[in-house]
Amino acid sequence: MPTILPTPDSISITPRRLHLEFDGLETTFVQGNPVLTSLFCSLSAVFPPGERQFIDSVRYYQDQVTDPEMKKRVRAFIGQEAHHGNLHEVFNDKIQDLGWRTDLVERQTTFINKFIVYMSPERQLAQTVALEHLTALFANFLMNNPDFLGKNPHPDLKTLFMWHAVEETEHKAVAYDLYQQVVGNDKLRKAEMRFILPVFMGHMFESTALLLMRNKKLSHRGGWLKTRNELFGKHGVFTAIKAELNEYYDDEFHPWQTDNSALANNWLQELAL
């Protein structure tokens, strides 16, 4: 049986609307590394259509929720994801001017979503649950390792990604708890992670290479070895999240079994949100 854990009392799933300009952003804005920058551009390009798909998969079941607190959490989830998509669209327009063809990645993601929407609502929600877990793990890594963005990142860039990380943490169990209430098929939940994870990772790596090669404003395109170490090295992203990613396949998994609410609230204070 799946574990049911409450959202910590210190967590408030609050949609926060930010206004950022990103003026003066450099072309290689993540550690001065073209490949890492291209990866973050790819992530940002995926977010608007990806967040819309998440919202649709959750909204489909919204009317089946009877618990008032769960209804409130679902509405807050939708509000946060909508704001994320909107602000990343602003950011994508800015980095498009720096030569990063985010429009190509958004177009590819929208194309992929056209196939996903023909899947059953249960599968779509299960995929949302899986990708929300992956996003929450990356958010936790970023909150613990803010220097991943660089020693002195652009302030609006830092605010964008840390705000996003905080809110992904706040609502990291909403889609999961909804899924357990309205679907409750743990075999399907695990199967959809096995399906969607390689699809998403393949899309991200292909998109990173595409954006890197299409950015004609770069005088060089080095940085692959450093990126490999940052992602898969001893202290890399996937090395850090591997154990928690595998916990998803446990029968008693729950997103809040790792309680990082204090970390998220510390970042809220630092960002003055």
Image (tube, rainbow, N blue to C red):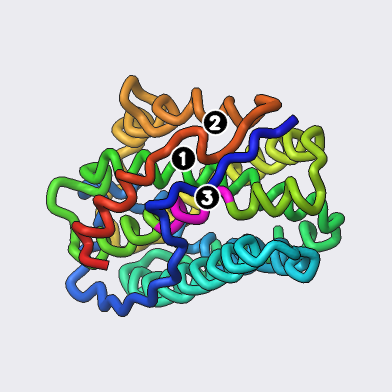
Tell me the residue that label 1 is attached to: 137
Label whose residue precedes the other's in the sequence (3 or 2): 3
Q: Is residue 171 magenta?
A: yes
Q: Is residue 226 above or below residue 55?
A: above
Q: Is residue 140 left or right of residue 248?
A: left
Q: Where is residue 51, by image quadrant? A: bottom right
Q: So how many labels did they put on this image? A: 3
Tell whether label 1 touches label 2 (CB within 8 Å): yes
At label 1, the amino acid type is: Leu
Instruction: Magenta stretch: give its range.
Output: 167-173
Where 52 falls versus 121 (above or below)? below
* Residue 107 seen in the current view: no
The quadrant in which the N terminus is found is top right
Residue drawn at x 59%, y 36% is 254
Verify whether residue 153 appears in magenta: no
Instruction: Give percent across and percent down for residue 91.
Output: 37, 71
